[in-house]
Amino acid sequence: MVSFSDIEQAAARIQPYIHRTPVMTSRLFNAASSVQTHFKCENLQRGGAFKLRGGANFLLSIPDSDIANGVVAFSSGNHAQAVAIAAGIRKTKATLVMPTDAPQSKAEATAAYGGTIIRFDRLKDDREAIGRRIAEETKATLVPPFDHPWIIAGQGTAAMELLTDIGPVDALVACVGGGGLLAGSATAAKAMYPSIRVFGVEPAIANDWALSFAAGHPVAIPPPDTIADGLRSPKPGNITFSVVKPLVEDILLVTEEEIKATMKFLLLHMKILVEPSGAVAAAALLHGKLPAGIRTAGVILSGGNVDWDVLKSI
């Protein structure tokens, strides 16, 4: 459903509007993890997260005849910001359905990019139903956060850039919430280096992907209360799961304390601010979750948007 050619086309399409984010290394992290690690710093991406890649590719793929009615998206924050930015590029309006407990910094940034915010209670309300209702009433285009080929192809450009810059490594590691980043990354990685081992990482208390891998089909869990707010999707996407399952070796789990400790390590030793969701993949390496024998890895730091109060509490 998504090919490497799709990812290459997405890269060309979005190139004028995104940053080619840097790749960083840390001798201290390598020593602590026993893995030579290359970090793709999407926390330094425009909008503060990788999400602009998929959001821009989606909006730039919408026909001119449809874009005038605007777009609608549902998100805890990073996808909302991405869609608001991309709507500005396409000169159209964006309505963003965001949970009441979304990080304030993400809500404020989304509004600053010109988005109109509609709030919902993630423990009681169906965000997708709200988004679809608004889209139907306004004839706007619904921009899903992960479960669409245009989104997956756009997100895959992060891994394509990383592996282009660093060459072959033993493993590629990315966080997984809905699965857009992991699906796109796995597609790119396996096309470029078929022998590479690909791993997804999620919080242990938001383990819908681990359960789904074990079951062989998408499994839903109650809304998880993880600090990694970008990874609170309670169920894998149907499309993302079908892409990820044959390409990804395993889904690794990290605890809330391991996520916090990794954020602190990245901030204090590498001098980069990474949000909880963005630290999840690195946490798997720092806390020894990868299988034995992996000596080199590429890791995607997916975002850096974190509220000041959350950062202080950590």
Image (cartoon, rainbow, N blue to C red):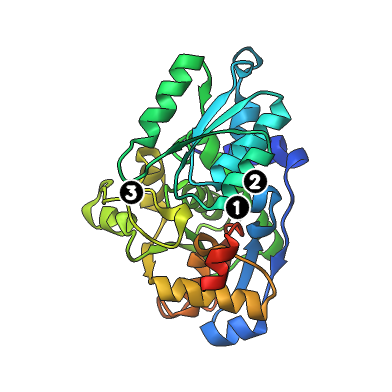
- Disc 3 marks which residue? 234
Instruction: State whether residue 7 appears in this view.
Output: no
> Mark 2–mark 1 contact, CB under 8 Å?
yes
Q: Nearer the viewer, mark 3 or mark 1?
A: 1
Q: CA distance from mark 2 to mark 1?
A: 6 Å
Q: CA distance from mark 3 to mark 2?
A: 25 Å
Where is 309 relative to 132, above or below? below
Q: Residues within 10 Å of mark 1 (few under 14, many from 20)?
A: few
> Mark 3–mark 1 contact, CB under 8 Å?
no
Where is 34 relative to 185, above or below? below
Q: CA distance from mark 3 to mark 1?
A: 23 Å
Across and down, in percent, residue 233 comes to 38, 48
- Disc 2 marks which residue? 109
- Disc 1 marks which residue? 105
Q: At 70% from the left edge and 49% from the top edge, which residue is drawn?
A: 46
Q: Nearer the viewer, mark 3 or mark 2?
A: 2
Identify residue type, mark 1: Ser
Identify residue type, mark 3: Pro
Q: Is residue 276 left or right of residue 82?
A: left
Where is 33 relative to 201, above or below? below
Q: At 52% from the left edge and 82% from the top edge, which residue is drawn?
A: 33
Q: At 51% from the left edge and 33% from the top edge, which residue is drawn?
A: 73
